Image (tube, coloured by chain):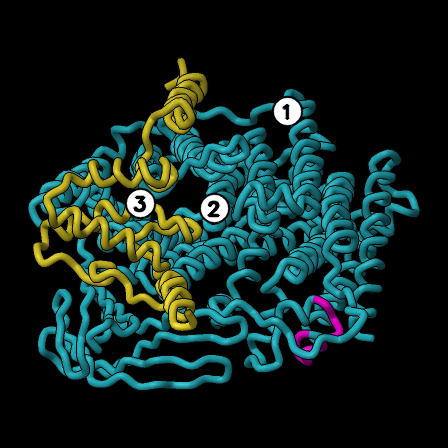
Chain colours: A yellow, B cyan
């Protein structure tokens, strides 16, 4: 009985140990051998947000979670997945928040419309200021 | 005792700010010569002294680590080098706000003491505005963020300062930015003063200009230093993240840059009056918005802000009063101020207007991208706005602006013909074309990096064109300042584009004695050793790095563990050559006993910060040049007045 309890305790302790000092996933700090694939992975990683950091992409973070995401991105690229498919997979899991790549949607349209209005406004200011005089 | 002296000085200073405000207002109602009005200037000067005393008291309690003061106990520690104990005084909310009011009161004291060229009524209105702004910040400090609060029981040991902040670069980064922010508060007060008395004159712009220039120089230095700090301290070689805190400092800089150019037009040509006033209000609004963003906790999460809204609400309230008030005043008075001298599109003023509009548009984009995620988060929708948004959208306005920056300084004031500078414009266009072709063949870079490299080269050449055909010894210092600052912008752009186009990265797992290479560098990990410091322990990787098989350089980047508070940081090592930097980081050990090493070769990356320094140097030169001319003008005026006096007495 005592042995059984000890065994159960040991089993319960496993996930706890797993949270502490697991070494980072292999491709968190390792590049892909194919330079073209690594470049594609790098480009994608620079536009994915590290969810545990403030305003850093997963390409510039020491956070363990960013490391795990780098690992995911690299092995999926190595498997021949398209970068945009990986982005979609991550967005399905973590929400749109994980991607820095701006997408036009019901919540983000002002981000695109306002700069266009700014261009128009600038042209209007120039026209009014400089019209009719040479 | 020392803490109480500081607190008392702060209350007295607040009382003097009330006096300054009342004196200024009474002077405006009367003829400017009543008895209380005579107190406005002395009140401002004395206030500066008192706040400096309060700040000195805070430095003192931090230097001796007086743990009965709450602020010291929560943000300092006895086992810390003295320099970081002292810099810890402003490495926290209360201390940094005290630093803010200190700089502000000293600036107010300075204008009260030396500024004599404006009409007395405008000056009184300016000082009243300055007193009013200062008063809000005293209230904020004394009512919600008292830095001198005592603990009922002295703490046994302090909680420590964030290790990332224990860095000499960062110790002086906030003061630099604050001096910039606060310099803009002076420009704001001048703008409000001129609005109240409706005297928007070239003299007003000349009085305001040294403050804008000074603030702009400090903001430039602050941004440059902050960017370099992020670059070497965060350990991944990124130098700008479009983080809201960075944007909070960038926005006042953009506004100040626009203001600087438009104030020059007002000072020299008596044009762009309304625009200058408007930018004066906007620039300080951006400083206050930046303070709000950084100090309110709204950035960590809108919801974190809602949990403890006291401080954030207070700053928001101040923001609403000052900016709302100033904008209301502007709306009421702008109609009464004429636009000033007119000019044509093909003129120096025309080019500056285009630049100002573009800078304002970039400012609007940064503002939008910074605030929009906060707005959506309030409705529980989280949106990420980052480099993939800011870079291209900002570029839409930045590249036209840079084009105008290249040719604008060649145009004459008021009216000119494009034909007159066709040769120079042809040269710039040819350089742009050649650059696109050359870099397009040479580098496999993104469009933005390609444009950046090309524009940088063309701009660097164009920045010298205003000197063409002039006797170099007779070119005014301020003009040299412009040349240097514009060259600095080109250099910065080159560094950024080169970093983005040509950087090489290597992540390697090495055993002791193992070799790897990145770009032209080969690096050997000689040994891994433990190291201990006053409040940290570290693993240091001794490496020898050689550039193209040349003489090896010994470096030892560290991975540090601080214990108060516990945190891990990377101490990267940089090897700087004229054509770039090797960036080396020591990581942890991997399972098989090898060590993680991160290496980057970043060609010409240093140009980013050299460029920033050149921009600041250009600002200093302009400042020196302008102040010299102003002093000479003042001397001439005094001589004239004396002679007139002499003649009158002779008659």
What is the spatial separation of the Cα atoms under label 3 and label 2, in whole angstroms?
A: 17 Å
Residue visible at 65% across and 30% down in the picture = B327
Q: Is residue B520 magenta?
A: no
Residue A48, labelled with which disc? 3
Instruction: Reply above or below: A117 against B107.
Output: above
Visible residue check, residue A126: no
Q: Position of residue B137 (x, y in %)?
A: 72, 50
Residue B244, labelled with which disc? 2
Give the magenta range: B62-70
Q: Position of residue B67 (x, y in %)?
A: 71, 76
Q: Secondary structure at mark 3?
A: loop
Instruction: Reply above or below: B550 against B436.
Output: below
List the residue tagged with mark 1. B334
Among the two numbered marks 1 and 2 on one chain, the one whose residue lies closer to the N terminus: 2
Mark 2 burial class by Cα count in 10 Å: few <14, some 14-19, many 20+:
many
Instruction: Reply above or below: B519 against A110.
Output: below
Q: Secondary structure at mark 1?
A: helix
Determine contact: label 1, label 2, CB under 8 Å.
no
Q: Share a chain, discs 3 and 1? A: no
């Amino acid at each position: 009985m005592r042995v059984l309890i000890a065994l159960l305790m040991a089993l319960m302790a496993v996930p706890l140990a797993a949270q502490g000092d697991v070494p980072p996933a292999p491709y968190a700090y390792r590049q892909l051998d194919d330079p073209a694939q690594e470049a594609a992975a790098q480009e994608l990683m620079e536009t994915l947000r590290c969810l545990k950091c403030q305003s850093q992409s997963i390409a510039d973070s020491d956070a363990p979670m960013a490391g795990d995401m780098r690992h995911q991105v690299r092995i999926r690229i190595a498997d021949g997945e398209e970068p945009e498919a990986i982005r979609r997979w991550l967005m399905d899991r973590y929400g749109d928040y994980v991607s820095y790549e701006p997408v036009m949607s019901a919540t983000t349209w002002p981000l695109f419309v306002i700069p266009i209005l700014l261009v128009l406004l600038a042209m209007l200011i120039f026209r009014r200021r400089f019209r009719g005089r040479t | 005792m020392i803490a109480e002296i500081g607190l008392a000085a702060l209350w007295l200073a607040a009382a003097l700010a009330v006096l300054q405000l009342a004196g200024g207002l009474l002077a405006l109602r009367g003829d400017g010569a009543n008895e209380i009005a005579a107190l406005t200037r002395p009140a401002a000067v004395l206030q500066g002294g008192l706040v400096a005393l309060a700040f000195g008291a805070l430095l003192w309690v931090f230097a001796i680590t007086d743990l009965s003061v709450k602020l010291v106990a929560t943000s300092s520690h006895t086992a810390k080098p003295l320099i970081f104990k002292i810099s810890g005084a402003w490495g926290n909310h209360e201390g940094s706000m005290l630093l803010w009011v200190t700089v502000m009161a000293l600036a107010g004291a300075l204008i009260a003491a030396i500024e004599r060229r404006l009409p007395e009524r405008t000056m009184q209105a300016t000082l009243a505005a300055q007193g009013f702004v200062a008063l809000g910040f005293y209230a904020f400090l004394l009512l919600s963020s008292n830095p001198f609060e005592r603990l009922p029981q002295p703490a046994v040991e302090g909680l420590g300062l964030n290790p990332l902040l224990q860095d000499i670069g960062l110790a002086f980064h906030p003061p630099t930015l604050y001096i910039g922010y606060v310099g803009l508060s002076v420009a704001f007060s001048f703008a409000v003063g001129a609005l109240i008395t409706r005297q928007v004159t070239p003299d007003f712009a000349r009085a305001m200009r040294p403050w804008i220039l000074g603030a702009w120089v400090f903001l430039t230095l602050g941004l440059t230093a902050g960017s370099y700090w992020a670059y070497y301290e965060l350990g991944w070689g990124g130098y700008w993240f479009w983080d809201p805190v960075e944007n909070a400092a960038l926005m006042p800089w953009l506004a100040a840059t626009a203001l600087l150019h438009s104030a020059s037009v007002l000072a020299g040509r008596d044009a762009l009056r309304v625009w200058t006033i408007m930018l004066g209000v906007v620039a300080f609004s951006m400083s206050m918005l930046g303070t709000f963003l950084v100090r309110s906790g709204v950035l960590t999460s809108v919801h974190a802000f809602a949990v403890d809204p006291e401080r954030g609400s207070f700053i928001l309230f101040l923001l609403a009063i000052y900016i709302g008030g100033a904008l209301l005043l502007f709306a009421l008075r702008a109609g009464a101020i004429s636009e000033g001298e007119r000019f044509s599109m093909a003129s120096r003023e025309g080019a500056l207007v285009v630049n100002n509009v573009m800078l304002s548009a970039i400012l609007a984009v940064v503002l939008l991208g910074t605030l929009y995620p906060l707005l959506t988060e309030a409705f529980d929708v989280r949106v990420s706005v980052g480099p993939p948004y800011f870079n291209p959208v900002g570029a839409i306005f930045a590249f036209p602006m840079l084009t105008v920056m290249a040719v604008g300084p060649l145009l004459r004031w008021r009216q000119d013909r494009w034909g007159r500078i066709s040769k120079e414009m042809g040269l710039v266009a040819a350089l742009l074309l050649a650059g696109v072709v050359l870099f397009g063949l040479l580098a496999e870079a993104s469009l933005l990096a390609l444009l950046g490299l090309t524009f940088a080269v063309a701009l660097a050449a164009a920045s010298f064109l205003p000197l063409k055909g002039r006797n170099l010894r007779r070119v005014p210092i301020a003009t040299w300042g412009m040349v240097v600052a514009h060259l600095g912008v080109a250099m910065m752009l080159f560094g950024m584009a080169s970093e983005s186009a040509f950087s090489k990265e290597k992540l390697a797992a090495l055993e002791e004695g193992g070799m790897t290479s990145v770009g032209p560098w080969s690096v050997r990990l000689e040994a891994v050793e433990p190291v201990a410091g006053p409040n940290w322990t570290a693993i240091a990787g001794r490496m020898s790095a050689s550039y193209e098989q040349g003489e090896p350089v010994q470096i030892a980047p560290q991975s540090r563990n601080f214990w108060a508070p516990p945190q891990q940081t990377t101490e990267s090592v940089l090897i700087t050559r004229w054509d770039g930097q090797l960036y080396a980081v020591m990581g942890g050990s991997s399972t098989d006993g090898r060590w993680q090493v991160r290496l980057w070769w970043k060609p010409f990356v240093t140009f980013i910060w050299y460029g920033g320094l050149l921009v600041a140097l250009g600002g200093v030169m302009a400042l020196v040049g302008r102040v010299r001319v102003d002093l000479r003008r003042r001397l001439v005026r005094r001589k004239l007045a004396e002679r007139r006096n002499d003649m009158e007495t002779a008659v």
